[in-house]
Image (cartoon, rainbow, N blue to C red):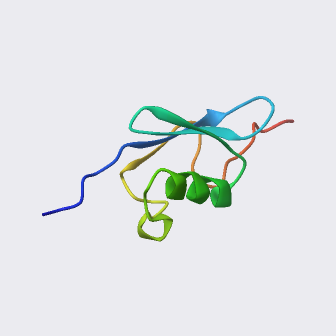
Amino acid sequence: MPKPRHRIAVHPPAPAGGRRVSVDAESLGVAIDVADLREFLRRAGLDPEDVRLDDPAIEWRGGGPDVWSIATE
């Protein structure tokens, strides 16, 4: 039986920095980098090593995995 797919959302950067992360519409917290994201996924019961950052299950809102703060000029 295939593993159930989870909807992972990485929300746009907040003005104070970091991005809110949710899995299946449950907010997990604010990540400041990819390491935080992987830790949140682990706590949610997912194997972070099995989740690729380019996986279509991750919805990157407001920038990809290299964007963790709002750009300032």
Give the side of residue 30 with respect to residue 47, left or right. Answer: right
At a point 37% along the width and 43% down the height, the residue shown is: 7
Image: 56 above or below 23: below
Give the side of residue 55 with respect to residue 61, left or right. Answer: left
Give the side of residue 55 with respect to residue 69, left or right. Answer: left
At a point 71% along the width and 31% down the height, the residue shown is: 14
Residue 11 coordinates in the image, percent (x, y): 56, 35
Q: Number of marks in the image?
A: 0
Q: In the image as oriented, which residue stretches furthest toward the bottom?
A: 49
The image quadrant that residue 35 belongs to is: bottom right
Q: In the image as oriented, which residue stretches furthest toward the left?
A: 1
Residue 50 coordinates in the image, percent (x, y): 41, 68
**Nearest to the observer: residue 36 or residue 60:** 36
**Nearest to the observer: residue 6 or residue 64:** 6
Image: 15 above or below 35: above
Give the side of residue 66 with respect to residue 27, left or right. Answer: right
At a point 53% along the width and 53% down the height, the residue shown is: 43
Residue 55 coordinates in the image, percent (x, y): 39, 58
Residue 1 coordinates in the image, percent (x, y): 12, 63
The image quadrant that residue 66 belongs to is: bottom right
Image: 63 above or below 35: above
Q: In the image as oriented, which residue stretches furthest toward the top?
A: 15
Q: Quadrant of the C terminus?
A: top right
**Nearest to the observer: residue 2 or residue 54:** 2
